[in-house]
Image (cartoon, rainbow, N blue to C red):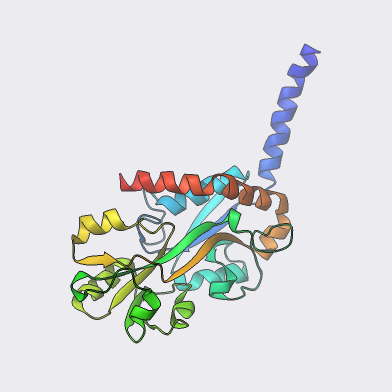
Amino acid sequence: MRLSHLLSLPLLALLAGQAIGACAPLRYGYTDKAVAPYYLGSGSEEGKPPGALAELTRESVNGGGCPIVMVRMPPARLRASLEEGRIDATSLFAPDIIGTVPNTVYPRDKSGKIDPSRGIPLYTVVFVRAGDHYPRHGEPAALLRGRTVGLSQGAPHIAAVRGLGVEVDDGAANPELNFEKLKLGRIDAFAISISSMDDMDPMMAARYGRLFVRLDKPLLTSSSYLALNQAYYAANRSQAEAIWRWYGKHGQARMTALLKKYRD
């Protein structure tokens, strides 16, 4: 029995290798702009280090038994590239924020509803000039109605923010340029979606001191999901579900740890 057990080990290893190899490499599309601490570096190459969300995505895909190819592109092209199959996955807001996305699959629970336990919470936080003396405990949508809020080019929640009655300026390519516009008075606030309310506070304090403050309440609350192209999901269903299960089991804890790593 011991001999047969030993003989079975190479066979098991071979079968495991075939199972992983059967999963097509997943092409993950993400912004070619730096959005610290989530994505670092800019241009077509992966940053070194890549950023917290880039690392989390690689871990989750590998955790589901699939290889991953990181594909950077302008954020405005991500959604269309996913719909058309030029990439296999990207991180997306829920459809209640961005609308229906054709040819795209989200993780769903047994009742067929999108499963927030297999996503990452998102908070659209607002930074304003400290000298403007906004009441920090106020409702952001009410405070900013009739004012201009900066969002980065291609941000997926532009329409949702406009729907709150807020004027949107999405001309800046990245957060740094939006903070410069805020400093110069060209916009009244800057909004960005992050995984916990205080993710950017250490960086803001180090870079800008007391020039800006963050409002205490989010402008929007939603979740981010690793959304998959329909064709990729159909061809790799079991591995896709394994990736999402990994997200549900480890995603939030790993994101917290990775954010701490990048802050330190």
State the residue in front, 261 or 51. 261
Q: In this image, 191 relative to 238: left or right?
A: left
Q: Is residue 175 above or below residue 121?
A: below
x 41%, y 71%: residue: 219
Q: Is residue 12 above or below residue 7?
A: below
x 44%, y 57%: residue: 195
Residue 67 shows in the view: no
x 38%, y 59%: residue: 197
Q: Is residue 3 above or below residue 170?
A: above
Q: In this image, 214 relative to 69: left or right?
A: left
State the residue in front, 120 or 181. 120
Residue 215 shows in the view: yes
Q: Position of residue 131 (x, y in %)?
A: 18, 73
- Image quadrant in which the N terminus is located: top right
x 70%, y 41%: residue: 19
- Residue 193's quadrant in the figure? bottom left
Q: Position of residue 104 (x, y in %)?
A: 64, 67
**Name of the residue lying farthest toward the top:** 2
Q: Position of residue 251 (x, y in %)?
A: 53, 48
Q: Position of residue 130 (x, y in %)?
A: 21, 69
